[in-house]
Image: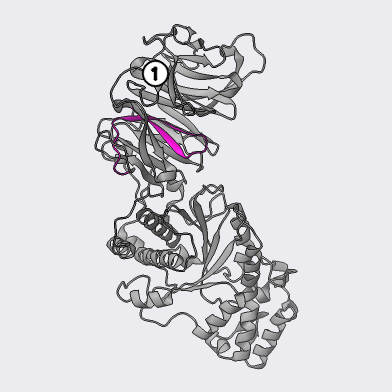
Amino acid sequence: MKGFLLFLFCCLLPPRTWALLPLQTYEDLAAGSPAMGYQDGPFYAALFHGPQGLAFNTDGTLLYVADGENHCIRVVDRGKGNLVSTLTGGGKAGYADGPLAAALFSHPTLLLFLPGQQLVVYDEGNARLRLVDLAQKTVTTLAGDGEPGLSDGPGAKASLGNLSGMAYLPSRGGVYFSSFGALRKVDFKTGQVSTVFRGKAEVPALGAMTVDQGRLYLADGTSGQVYQLTPKEKFDREDETSFDWQPFAKGQAIGQMAFSDGVLYAVQRGGAPFLARLTPQYQPVTFVSLWGDEQSQSVGSNPLLGGEGEGNPCFLAPDPLSPRKLYFSHPGANMVTSYRDLFLEEFKDSESENPEGLTDFRYPTAKPPGTFRILLVGDSHTFHQYPDDVKKRGWNAFNRFAILPKRAEETLNTLAALQDVPWHYEVLHYGEVSGNHLNLWPYYVVPRLAKKFDVDLVVIMYSPDFDLGPFYDYPYSAEGIPVEKQDNEFLLKPVEQRIQGGLPRELFDYCKAHELVKVINHQAQFAPFDRISGDPQAAEKLIQLTARPLKLLDEKLNGMKTSTGAPVRLEMVRFPLGRFPGPYEGDQAYWGKYMKEINAPLLDLTAAMSILRFSYYPLSQVGGYDHFNADGHLLMGFLLAEELIREKLIPFEPAK
C-alpha cells in the first residue's frame, strides 16, 4: 500500500523539473546531508561539516548555524525553502574582525541572537566571544584575549574558554556564559567581563543555561538539577546573592536546554534519553515515525540521533513560529533536523480525547504561520481500525498514525513538499463513536474546537444519519434542536409528552398514520430507513428535521472568523465505506436533498471509491460495522487530500 501511495504521488507531479521544499511532519530534514563538506544552495544539497550552535532571528525567518569544522556561520532561510548560504567566515580557520566577507573564525560553536540584529558567537578555536552586527554587516570581538582562562577585566583583556552555555538577560544588560564551571558575564554598557560565581555547591558542574520570562535557568551537568534564578531588583554586587534561587526541574546529563510553549526541553548525553521534557515533570521523549513505529534510541542505528560515535545531538533551538517545535544540529551527521513534540508516544496507541479536547495528538492551540488547519469530524469510521487487521500486522494496540486524518495530513504535506507549495497542513481530528449522533453533536462541539485551534476548514465525513433518537428523547433548545446531552428525567416521560411541536410532531404523526412508527415501552421505534425515505412526504420531513443542526452549524461557522479574518468554512464529505460488493450507502436522491437542506458544499468520494475499492479489496471488514483496515484509511486519506486540492478547497499554489 505504501507503494500505491508513492505511485499516486508520481501521477500528480508535473512532468518537469520542480523545486523541492522541506517536508513538515513530525521529524524532518531542515538542511544538510550525511556527507560532510562545504556547499551552499538548496537545503537538501547543502553540505555542512560538524554543525553545532543554532539560533533563530527574532521573527523566526532565519536559522543561523555555527558550522564548526568549516569555521563559518551559515544561514538557513526559511522564507526561501530553507535555502542555505554563508553569512560570514571564509571556510578556513583564522581570526580576523571586519566586514562579514573578510572575517575569520576558528571552530565556532555556541550562538546567541540578540535584539537589535546582533549575533553572539563563541569562537572556540580563538577562545573569544565575537559579535556579528547584522545591520552593519561587521564582525567585532566582544570578549577574550585568545588564551583560555578565567581572568576578568575589560573585554579584550579578559580570558575565557570551555563555554557550555550562553544566555541573554535583558534586565541585567549582558550575556551570561558558563566557563570552566563558573557563571560569567559580559556587560554591554561597560564592556567588562566579570565572574558572578564559581564553584557553587548547587551547580559544581555548571553547564547548560537558558532564559525564559526574565529568569535565568542553570543546569548542573552531573546531577541534572536545574535551578531558576530570578534577578533581584536591588543588590549591592552582582554575584550569586543578586538572584533568588529555586530548584526548578531535574534531568540527566543535560547538555543543552530550551523553553518552547512553556515546556522546558533538554538534550541529554551519556546514554540518557537524548531528548526529554523537564517540565511539568521529567518525561523522556520518544521519536515515532510516520508509520507509527518507535524510533531506536541507539546512536548509530538512528540517523536522527547523529553519526556513529557522536554521542547525541549537541545543540537545539526552539522555533519562534511553531510551539513545541525544536531544531537540532547533528555534528556527527552533518545535518540540521526538526522535531515537533505532539506527545506522539503518549497518544499513538490511544483513541481517547487529549487534554486540549481533540481525539488526536496534542497540537498546540496556536497555529504557526503558513499553516492551513483542517478539523476533520466524523464517527468511528474515521478513527477505528478493523481488529483483524491489527492482529495481522502484529500491532499490540491502536495506531493513530494509520487512521484517516493522519494519512490525509501526511499526503497533503508530502505533495506540498514535492510540488513546491509553501503551505503546511494540519488535519486535526475529533470523532465520536456511532452510538452518538453525528447529525447533532457537531453543532455543539465543532465551534468550540474551531475557535480554540483557529481552524480554517471543517470537514465532516458523513453518511445520512437516520437515527432519530435525540429528536424524540432529548429536550429542545431555543434554536429548535435537541440539547447537547440527554436528560434522564425528561426521558422518563411518555413519548407523547416528549414530542416537540412543529416538525418533530408532524413527522411523528405522519409516520404513525402510515404505520412507519410504533411506540413500545414509551419509546418511538421508526421503520427502516428505506421505507421512510421511499415515502416522499415522510422523507421531506425527515430531512428537514435531522439536517437542521448541521444547517445551523454551517451558519455559525460562517459567522466566525479565523486569525486572518476569513470565515470558517464547512465542507460535507460523503464518506463511502470500504466493503465490497455492495451498493453505495443510502439513497442518492435522499442524499442530494439532505445536503441541499444543510446548504453546505459537498464532496462526494463514492465515485472514486467505486473505481478503486474492488482493485484494493479488502479495505475494511466485510459486514459488521465496516471499519477500515490500515490500507483503507491510507486510500481514503489520499482520496480526501486529492479532492481538497482538485476542488481548490485549500490553498495549494506553487511558490512564485
Q: Is residue 513 magenta?
A: no
In the picture shown, does residue 552 fall above or below 374? below
Residue 469 location, quadrant: bottom right
Residue at point 42% right, 69% down? Answer: 627
In the picture shown, does residue 355 fall above or below 228? below
In the picture shown, does residue 452 fall above or below 311? below
Residue at point 37% right, 11% down? Answer: 146
Instruction: Residue 462 in the image: state x and y as whole percent.
Output: 51, 71
Residue 70 visible in rendering: yes
> Badge 1 is on which residue?
97
Between residue 452 and residue 112, name the one nearer to us.
112
Residue 485 location, quadrant: bottom right
Q: Is residue 596 left or right of residue 332?
A: right
Q: Is residue 596 left or right of residue 157?
A: right
In the rendered image, which quarter contains the N terminus?
A: bottom left
In the current view of this chain or complex, which residue is farthest to the bottom? 514
Q: Secondary structure at mark 1?
A: loop
Count all numbered tags in the image, as a single digit. 1
Q: Is residue 479 left or right of residue 608?
A: right
Magenta residues, start to end: 44-67
Residue 220 visible in rendering: no
Instruction: Residue 292 in the image: state x and y as whole percent.
Output: 37, 52
Tell me if mark 1 has few (under 14), some (14-19) or many (20+) residues whose alpha carbon lies within 10 angstroms of its own. Answer: some
Instruction: Residue 464 in the image: state x and y as whole percent.
Output: 54, 77
Between residue 611 and residue 352, name the one nearer to us.
611
Amino acid carrying label 1: it is Asp
Q: Is residue 50 magenta?
A: yes
